[in-house]
Image (cartoon, grey):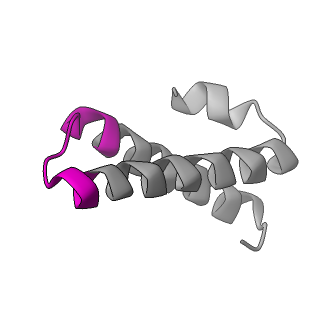
């Protein structure tokens, strides 16, 4: 997701997006643990990057996570 799209979301929606992304990251990590091979490294990188962006935006807004 683009940063400008994330900036337009309210804090409640960012919190929901954060929990969704963390769930996606956990699922991808389980797939890696089960098979021993990362299916799509780019997807994992994108998830981590988006989590970091959401956390940064929430910090800027002063929202406790």
* Residue 28 appears anywhere in the view: yes
User: Residue 37: percent from the left, percent from the top?
Assistant: 13, 48
Q: Which residue is depicted at the point 64% across and 47% down? A: 20
In this image, 3 relative to 19: left or right?
left
Quarter of the C terminus within the rendering: bottom right
Q: Residue furthest front?
A: 34
Q: Which residue is depicted at the point 54% across and 33% down? A: 3
Seen in the picture, residue 39 relative to 62 is either above or below; the reply is above
Seen in the picture, residue 64 relative to 38 is either above or below; the reply is below
Name the image quarter holding residue 62.
bottom right
* Residue 53 appears anywhere in the view: no
User: Residue 14: percent from the left, percent from the top?
Assistant: 73, 46
Give the magenta part as a residue range.
32-44
In this image, 51 relative to 12: left or right?
left
In terms of secondary structure, what is the magenta stretch mainly?
Answer: helix
Residue 44 vs residue 5, the one in the foreground: 44
Q: Residue furthest left?
A: 37
Q: Which residue is depicted at the point 64% across and 25% down? A: 5
Q: Which residue is depicted at the point 48% across and 43% down? A: 50
User: Residue 64: percent from the left, percent from the top?
Assistant: 76, 74
Exactly how many numbered labels are in the figure?
0
Name the image quarter holding residue 60.
bottom right
In this image, 8 relative to 19: left or right?
right
Q: Residue furthest bottom?
A: 64
Seen in the picture, residue 41 relative to 58 is either above or below; the reply is above
Magenta span includes 33: yes
Residue 10 vs residue 21, the one in the foreground: 21
User: Residue 54: percent from the left, percent from the top?
Assistant: 59, 50
């Amino acid at each position: 997701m683009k940063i400008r799209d994330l900036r337009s979301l309210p804090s409640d929606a960012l919190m929901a997006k954060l929990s969704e992304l963390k769930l996606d990251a956990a699922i991808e990590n389980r797939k890696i643990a089960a098979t021993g091979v990362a299916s799509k490294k780019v997807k994992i990188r994108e998830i981590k990057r988006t989590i970091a962006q959401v956390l940064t935006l929430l910090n800027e807004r002063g929202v406790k996570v």
